[in-house]
Amino acid sequence: MTQSVMTLARYILARQDTFPDSTGEFSNLMLLIGVATKTIAWELRQAGLVEDALGLTGAINVQGEQVKKMDDYANETFLKVFMNTGLVCTMVSEELEGPEHLMQPCTPGSYSLLVDPLDGSSNVDMNINTGSIFAIQRRRFCGDDEADLLQPGREQVAAGYVLYGPSTLLVFTTGHGVHVFTLDAAIGEFVLSTEDLVIPTQGRYYSVNQGNTRRWQPWLREYLDYLQTEDKATGRPYSARYVGSLAADIHRTLLTGGIFLYPADTKNTNGKLRLLYEANPIAMILEQAQGRAITDQGETILEITPTQLH
C-alpha cells in the first residue's frame, strides 16, 4: 500500500480541528452512525443464512406499512447504538410512532437524529440494494416538545445515507460538500473514496415508479413523454432506471446526473416520501452536490416547514 488511508474517523477528527469551539460530540455522533450501519450491513450479508432474518414481523408501522424483520433489526440497532451515549437527545424513525428520547433532559444545542433505518426494505428478500437515510438537527429549546423537531431542512446540521450492496457506501454532507466513504471489509473501516462529489451537468437517466402513471396529473405524463422523446441537442431520450430504494436511485443520480421523481398522485396526494427523514436529508445532499430538490409545485424542499413527524 503506497497511499495513506483516510478513514472516516481520521477524516472527521481532522475536520474537527478546524472548528475551535468543537466539543467532539458531533464527531462521535458521526462515528457511531458508522458503527450502526456497519452492524446493519453485516446482518444484511448474513440474512439469507440466518433463520428468521427475512420476511415480515406481522406488525404494521405508523405509515400503515408491513414491517420487515430487517426493518425492525435496523431500527433497534440505531436505538441500541445511541442509547445512553449522551450524544443524541431524541431519535425519530420511520418505525417509531413518536420520538424516542435517549437522554434526559434534552438541552438546547443537543442533537436529534432522524432516520429511515432501512430504506427499500422490500428489496431485502430479493438481495437488491437497500439503504439507511439520516439527518441530524440541533435542539432549539429545552424540553421534549415534539414541535422542536419540526424544523425546515435548511436547519439540518448534517445529512447522509448508507447504501448496502456489492460495496457498503456512506455518503454525507455537513454543509461543506458531499463526501463518499467505502467500507473496507479487510480493516472494518469506512475509507474516503470520493471528496466533494458534484452531479454531472447532463444526465442520462430518469428514475420513477411508472406503475403509478395512470394516477399522475396529465402534465407529469407529458413530462415523461418529453424525457422519452429523441432529441440529440438536449441529450434525449433519457433511459429509465428504478431500484425502488431511494438511497440507491439517488446514488445513481449523484454519479451519472439525471432526474429522480416520486410525485404526488391521486392515491398519495401529498407524495409518498417523508419530509423529515427522507426528502430533507436527500435534498441537502443534492444541493451540496450542485443539484436541485423541489416539489411538484416548484417549492424548494429544504424551505418547507414540517407539520408532523411522518
Image (tube, rainbow, N blue to C red):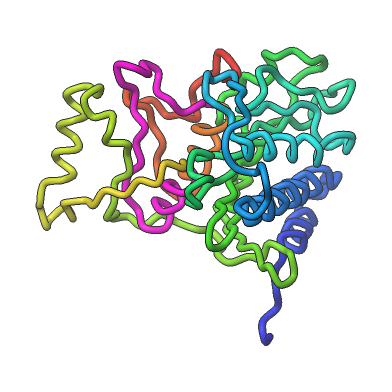
Work out whether 74 lies above or below 163.
above
Compared to residue 151, the image places residue 72 above or below, namely below
Residue that sits furthest to the front in the current view: 51
Residue 195 placement (x, y as % from top left): 56, 62
Residue 194 location in percent, x, y? 55, 64
The answer to whether residue 258 shows anywhere in this view is yes
Residue 291 in the figure: left or right of residue 176: left
- Quadrant into which the C terminus falls: top right
Residue 254 lies in the magenta stretch: yes
Residue 150 at x, y percent in the picture: 62, 19
Residue 177 appears in the rendering = no
Percent x, y of residue 251: 46, 51
Residue at 34% across, 17% down: 267
Q: Residue at x 61, y 60 (%)?
A: 181
Q: How many marks?
A: 0
Say if the magenta span includes residue 250: yes
Q: Residue at x 79, y 15 (%)?
A: 144
In the image, taking residue 139 as reference, residue 133 lies left or right, namely left
- Identify the image quadrant of residue 182: bottom right
Quadrant of residue 223 within the rendered picture: top left
Q: Which residues are magenta?
A: 247-275
Report the residue at 70% width, 33% height from top. 113
Q: Quadrant of the N terminus?
A: bottom right
